[in-house]
Structure formats: C-alpha cells, structure tokens
Image (cartoon, rainbow, N blue to C red):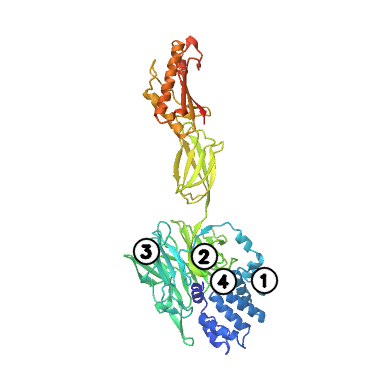
Amino acid sequence: MKKILILLSIILMNANFISAQNKTTEKADLFFDTYQYVNAITEYKKLAEGKHANAYIYSQLADCYYYVFNNQEASKWYAKAIATSKVDAEVYYKYAQTLKIQGNYIEANKQMELFCQMKPSDSRAIQHIKNPNYIKGLENKTKLFEVENPIFYTEGISDFGAILTDTNELYFTSNSNGSSKLDSRTAQPYLDIYKAIRNEDGFFSKPVAVSELNTIYHDGPLSLSNDGNTMILSRDGLSMGQFEKNKSAKVKVAQQGLYKATKMDGKWMNIEALPFNSQNYTVTNPSLSKDGKTLYFASNMPGGYGDTDIWKVQIANNTYSKPENLGPKINSSEKESFPFITENNILYFSASGRQGFGGLDIYKIDLSLLDEALNVGKPVNSEKDDFSFSFNTKFNTGYFTSNRSNSDAIYSAIPICKSDLSIVVSDIKTGITIENALVSLFDKNGNSITSKATDKNGNVTFEVQCYTEFNITVTSQNHETVSYPVAGISSSAESVFVKLKPLEVVITDKEVLLNVVYFEFNKSNITAQGSIELDKLVKVMNENPTFVIYIKSHTDSKGKADYNLKLSEQRAQATVQYVISKGIASDRISGKGFGISELKVACGSQCTEEEHALNRRSEFLIVKK
C-alpha cells in the first residue's frame, strides 16, 4: 500500500485542511498541506532530530508515515509524540491502528482505551467499548474463501483493482509502466490500466497496457458493463485540466473523477466526464451494477459520514441522478472505499473504521436486506491492507489486492461452499431401496475422493464442495455398476436418485445363479441358448479370478436312472469344456452328473412338465472364493 493508498489518501482528503503552522515548521507544513508527504517527511525528520523537536513535530511526522502507509515508522513517532506531552485523541487512534497492522493487538487496545476516555461518544469509541476483544471472534469465523498465490507479483510494483470479464479478460491498474515521470507527491510512477487474458487453467498472459485509456497521469481503477462494451474509469484531474495551483508550494492539486468510455471495433474511445465530477472533491473507484442502472463509487463529497464514503447514482437514458450516500450501515467516520456490487446485490467494500484485523479490511453486505456488514475474515483479510475485491459469477472466482507480501499484489479468492449430497439407490425393476450399495466419489480427473455404503433406506450422504465437478460410481451385488458425472452443486443440499438394473446373473454366498441351461432332448450338446448363459458364468469368473466353480448336472425322472446318470455326466463335462474353451483355467472348473439322485421336486410318476423342468437343471456352486 505504500504506493496505491498514498495516492488514494491524498486525493480523498479534505483539500481545506491546513495544519497548525509556525515559522519553524512552515516549510514542512506546506509540503504536508499540499499532500507532498515524501518531501514533508524529509523536513519533519530534520526537525524531529533537532533542538526544536516537540509533540507536534513528532505527530506530524507520524501522520506523514501514516498517510503513506509506513506503519512501523508511524508507530515509532506516534509513541514518541505521546511520550512527550498530551496529544489529540486522533493521535491515540492512529497509533492504535498502526499497532493493529503490526499484529500488536494488546498494545493497540491500550491506546484505544485512552482514545475512548478522550472521546467516549465517538462511534469508534462506542464500538470498541462494546467489544474490545473482538479479534478472537474474527479469527474463529468460518472461512468463506480459499486464497491462492498472487497472479502477478513484482517487488516494488503495485497492482490492484482487478476485474475479470465473462470473456476471460482481466483489467487492472498498475504502476508498472517503468516511466521516469513520477508523481511528485508520492515519488512513484503514475498508474495505468492494463489487461491480461485468462486461459482455461486459470493462468494469465503477460499484461499489456491499454494504451487508448492511459494518459501521462493517473488512470484507473475501473468498472465494466455486463456486455463489456462500456467502461467507467477513474482518472486524475491533471490529465483533463481540472486542478488548482498552489503557488507557494509550486504544485497542482487535482481531484480524481469518473469517466465513461465505450468500446468500438475492439478499441476504447469516446471518453467523457461524468456530470458529478468536481474540483472540490474526488469521486473514484467505480462499480457498475449488472443491469447498468446503478453506479457505486467512493467520494469525500460533502454530506458524508467521515473520511471517504460509498455513494451511488442511478443511470437512465445516459443521465445521472444526484449522488446518494449509502448511509451508516456501510459508511463510518473513517474510510470506506473500493465498492463492488455483485449480480445478486451483494456489496463488497473496504473499510478502516470498523473492527478489523488491521489497516483496510474487506466487508460484504446484502443491499436487499441491509443487515450488518460482515467482515469476510481470513484468509482474505489480514493484519495488512486488503482491498479492491471483485467477483465473477460465471467463473466463481474473486480477486482482491493485499500488501501482505510487502507490495500490492492481486490475489484470487475461491468461495468455500459446502453442500450435502444425498445419494438414494434403488432397484429399477422393483423400486426397492438397496442397502449396502457402495457409492464412490471421484474428482473430474478420476482420483478417488471417498466411498460409503448405503444405509437400510438405500441412502448415503457426502459433504462436497459446491461448484465442483466430480463423478460417482455405484456398485451393488447382483446389480449392474453405474458411473456418471455430477455437475457442480450450488445449493446447500441436493439429492441424486440412482436406479440400478439387476444382473441376469445372481451371485450368492454359495453359488452363481443362471437361467436354465438348455440341452437338446437326449443330447449333451451346448445349445445357442445354453452358450449365452454359460458366457455369463465366464464373465463372473473373469471378474472374480479367485472363484472355483463345481458344476452339478441333474436330469428329470423320465427314463431309466442309469441312463439319466450317464446323460447328466456328459452334460456336466460338456459344460466344463465349454467354460475352459473360453479361457478359464481347468483347475478352476469341474463338474459331475447326478442324474435323478438329487431331484428338486420328488413327484415320482405324477410329475407335471413344470416339475420336470425344475428337476432338469444345472447348479454352479462356488467352492472357493
């Protein structure tokens, strides 16, 4: 943040603020009043190390570091100011903020308690008194996002304000142009607008500057219409001639404004200022609603609650309504900025005046309900500055900027969404639910995730990530195995009904049950129908390579017993030879004929044809598994 937020703090501060001056501090104060904090630091530091050092100089030097987000130095000089003499309540408040950013919450609380004693009716004091030890609650919040490594990172370069379009174009703002022309207030290059292309794997091409949008001064951040053909962008007033000259400091003081651009033939053109821009205050950080009818932005215009607030205007027929403040549910006495409105009316914004981890934190609020704004928690927020959150619904991916790694970098944020996926398994023919069916989950690459067996109601439930593609496989004894993909689930609970087709071959603990294996009358030749059934046995044995089968062949009670015994033996051996011919090892299959010795129906000479058919059978016993 030592680069981006320096600028944003400068342009969003009240231009009428003048510090208490005297002859000793006159030069330093002039730099301070014209937002030239880098030069002011040099002058105040000389004074702080000299014989005229006092609490005012220390606090002014600390403020300079505070406004350029050098919190370690700011903390050092605030401590020195407080130790020297009584100081203004805001010094204690700012000191507390710098301590929080450094993760020193215990000492920060001590400074906040002093602030509360001096300004007990301040909204920040009321908030602290109500919940002074809020950090533990924030740290224990349910994680809403997974955060990945920066998509671009170069030490010393600031990238922020990323917006991903539905056509995989990423627009963002950066000071990586390498220009030798520097902003005199920050001693850093001016900001430009860049674009990169996101590929199918989520990686980005090398960013390129969008030349038709960039000037020699600050350009960006921006927002895009849903169709990607209209852009609202922030731009420094210097490039448009909207500034005031401070002759004594020899600087031009400009405000940021919002501008509209349209895309034609792949190029941005027709850039025009929005009517509520002003030389007296800044409007910046735009976010356009999906329907293009509402524009949200940050501004320090009159009528706000604090440093900077979030506002909105309505758009109709290319005309803009009077700006409307979003009110105290969102805005505070401190800084609110970087609004982003989602398709479902969730507003994300960054704020420093709420109880957060430190610096700027990212919050969200449902504008349809207007409940309390919610800190999105870690890992999106950190003790450092976290800001400029955006979200693409199509790709279910957010982006935000943080200086947690010393330089402002863009990080991606993937929503964490859990859903209960219930699988109900039943028989397709009977409709009866199947107990102990094995349901297995695999990721889209075929890697196993987990497996569970269904309960007595044929049900099993998995907790899965929303929007994640995966496959399920369901197996059950005596049923065909099924596998198919499941699309990403977006609801908190979803049921999938699986109907299994029963196998024509049933395997019990003791035998393989086939349909009747028919033979021609008085013959042992395998018929065409018989081969179909025996092929099923071959399949079972191939799928269960440890099975050893013993075939028992039986006849009906027609004819003489010795003849039937001989016929059944021939049929048993014919069956064994058929199975061996299909590639099954001979030591895994054997058989014997039993003639009429083991009739299934003992009906004597009074047997019906149906009873004869029941007796005329083959059994395929599993003698080893």
**Residue 456 in the figure: left or right of residue 394:** right
Q: Amino acid at mark 1?
A: Lys
Residue drawn 35% across and 66% down? 263
| Residue 147 x/y as whole percent | 51, 60
Q: To which residue does mark 2 refer?
A: 349
Of badges 2 and 1, the one in the foreground is 1
| Residue 452 x/y as whole percent | 54, 42
- Is 419 rendered above or below residue 245? above
Closest to the observer: 388 or 339? 388
Mark 3–mark 1 Cα distance, whole angstroms, equals 52 Å
**Nearer the N terminus, badge 1 or badge 4?**
1
Q: Amino acid at mark 2?
A: Phe
Q: To which residue does mark 3 refer?
A: 229
| Residue 557 x/y as whole percent | 46, 13
Of badges 1 and 4, the one in the foreground is 1
User: Could you tell me if residue 294 is visible in this image?
Assistant: no
Q: To which residue does mark 4 refer?
A: 334
Query: Dot 3, crowdedness within 10 Å: few (<14), some or many (≥20)?
Result: some
Q: Which mark is residue 438?
A: none
Q: To which residue does mark 1 refer?
A: 110
User: Could you tell me if residue 319 is visible in this image?
Assistant: yes
**Nearer the N terminus, badge 2 or badge 1?**
1
Q: Amino acid at mark 4?
A: Glu
Describe the element under mark 4 as helix, strand or loop.
loop
Q: Residue furthest left?
A: 265
| Residue 385 x/y as whole percent | 54, 68
Mark 2–mark 4 Cα distance, whole angstroms, equals 13 Å
**Residue 59 in the figure: left or right of residue 614:** right
**Nearer the N terminus, badge 2 or badge 4?**
4
Of badges 3 and 1, the one in the foreground is 1
Mark 1–mark 4 Cα distance, whole angstroms, equals 20 Å
Q: Amino acid at mark 3?
A: Asn
